[in-house]
Image: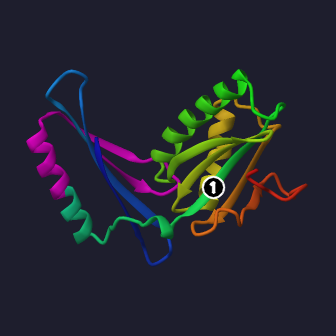
Amino acid sequence: MSIVRTYRRDEDGTLYFREAWFSTYEGEELGQFVVNHGTVGHMSTTETAKDVNDATAVGLLDAFSEQCQVDGFATITDADQGWVVVQYALKTAEGTDRDKYLEATAKEALVGHLAWRGLGTVESSDYAPRKLNIRILSPEPKKAVTAIKTCLREAKLDFTKLSIATAPFEDVEKLRQAYPLPAKAPFTLG
């Protein structure tokens, strides 16, 4: 599945996004072409064309990219985004089966919640001694923090062991805790 994701900031500073992708139905030659767009941080609007073949999808993606450029939308570089790290404190140094379930459930919930709002992508997760870190790359880290809290509450995932921090793209080690505040200790990945 190929995806084209673009952004545009208006004169008041509001960030908008547009994205399109094509995916085929399992075991079939036809698929669907999807256009998703909206204001970053808010639920997007989606339009779908079904029963599209590969050749038509290529043309639709090209036309979408061209229209985005005409309308002032452009792809955003990693360097123009920031990191958001969702961290869970664990009871053991290396994590348990319950923690692996937490990781999978949290990542799945975050992928969809953030994507439909143009707030970024879940890039990776890892375990450090007594910590689970989920790394997210976001064009609007502050808005992503708010959305992450909402998402994890809706998914009924434990908030008592949760911390969230943000950092500039160029240095993920310069993390500043964003939840909970005030920070009780420095936020570290390890």
Amino acid type at mark 1: Val
Position of the N terminus, as image quadrant, is top left
- Quadrant of res 27: top left
Horizontal side of residue 51 vs 104, given as left or right: left
Horizontal side of residue 15 vs 125, given as left or right: left
Residue positioned 65% across, 25% down in the render = 101
- Quadrant of res 38: bottom left
Q: Nearer the viewer, residue 179 or 169?
A: 169
Q: Is residue 7 above or below residue 95?
A: below
Q: Position of residue 129 (x, y in %)?
A: 79, 41
Q: Which residue is mark 1?
A: 84
Q: Position of residue 166 (x, y in %)?
A: 67, 60
Q: Which residues are magenta?
A: 35-63
Does the stretch in magenta take in 26?
no
Q: How is the image coloured?
A: rainbow
Q: Position of residue 72 (x, y in %)?
A: 30, 72
